[in-house]
Image (cartoon, rainbow, N blue to C red):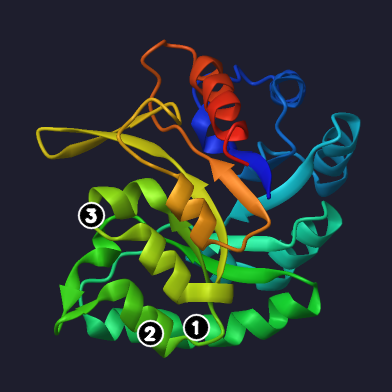
Amino acid sequence: MSIAIQLYSLRDYHRGDIDGMLEKLAAIGYAGVEFAGFYGLSAGETAGLLKKHNLAAAGSHVGADLLRADLRGAAEYHQAIGCRHISIPHYTFPNAAAIDALAAETAGWVPVLAEYGITLSYHNHGHEFEKIDGTYILDRLAAAAPELAFQIDCGWSYAAGVDTPAYVAALGARCVSLHIKDIVMRDGRPISVAVGTGEMDYCPIIAAANVEWLIVEVEESAAGDGFVEVAESWRNLKELV
């Protein structure tokens, strides 16, 4: 397993210097990055920066609206930068019909992306572990979309009270990556902290998974400089893998 960073973690701290951000991440020791947008860069420019800093494109978060608008354009961009995994980062499910509708759409997207060597997964937050008709939303999506893979955000599943090692194990090969996000619960609210400084025990989760990438995400920075938590997260997670 290799360690990557979700670049959303540094949305407030890169100061527009994408080259400098990637340089710092490579110096910390990260092997790859997961994108949440491309900063207006062309595929060639993004590929060039990744090559310059010897970083892999571990994945990319792409909203369903963007896939609807230009599926092949997204596929071509990601193929050009060597990115083999796209995750839908968020979706609202007001009812069972919305789950089934997204499942039907992904059934059409998965084979198109596969033509480009790209896997499509869904990334959970906490609301997918609410139940409709007695079943987790995420489980209903998994049943309705058998070709869809999943990226489990372990911090959100922990906050939802889910037995994450068991859930990851049950997904098996359909779990293609993990978001490694440590959590401290305060007044019922999950607070994102540097990996290894919160409440979570990642050893059984990692043991249950068979994934290529462990992707760190830190959504908040107590230090006021996201690179502090990002560096601490890499050091602490590296001790486990």
Q: Position of residue 237 (x, y in %)?
A: 56, 34
Secondary structure, mark 3, is: loop
Instruction: Specify whether residue 36 is in view.
Output: no
- Callout 3 crowding tier (Cα within 10 Å): few <14, some 14–19, many ≥20: some
> What amino acid is labelled 1 in the image?
Glu
Specify the label residue 105 is tagged with: 1
Q: Are marks 1 and 2 in contact (CB under 8 Å)?
A: yes
Q: Which quarter of the figure has residue 240?
A: top right
Q: Position of residue 193 (x, y in %)?
A: 37, 27
Mark 1 or mark 3, earlier in chain: 1
Q: Give the position of the C terminus as an image quadrant.
A: top right
Q: Which residue is mark 3?
A: 160
Residue at 18% of width from left, 74% of height from top?
A: 131
Alpha-carbon span between mark 3 and mark 2: 24 Å
Q: Are marks 1 and 3 in contact (CB under 8 Å)?
A: no
Classify residue 36 as left or right of residue 142. Answer: right
Residue 155 or 168: which is nearer the viewer? Answer: 168
> What amino acid is labelled 3 in the image?
Ala
Q: Is residue 4 above or below residue 147?
A: above
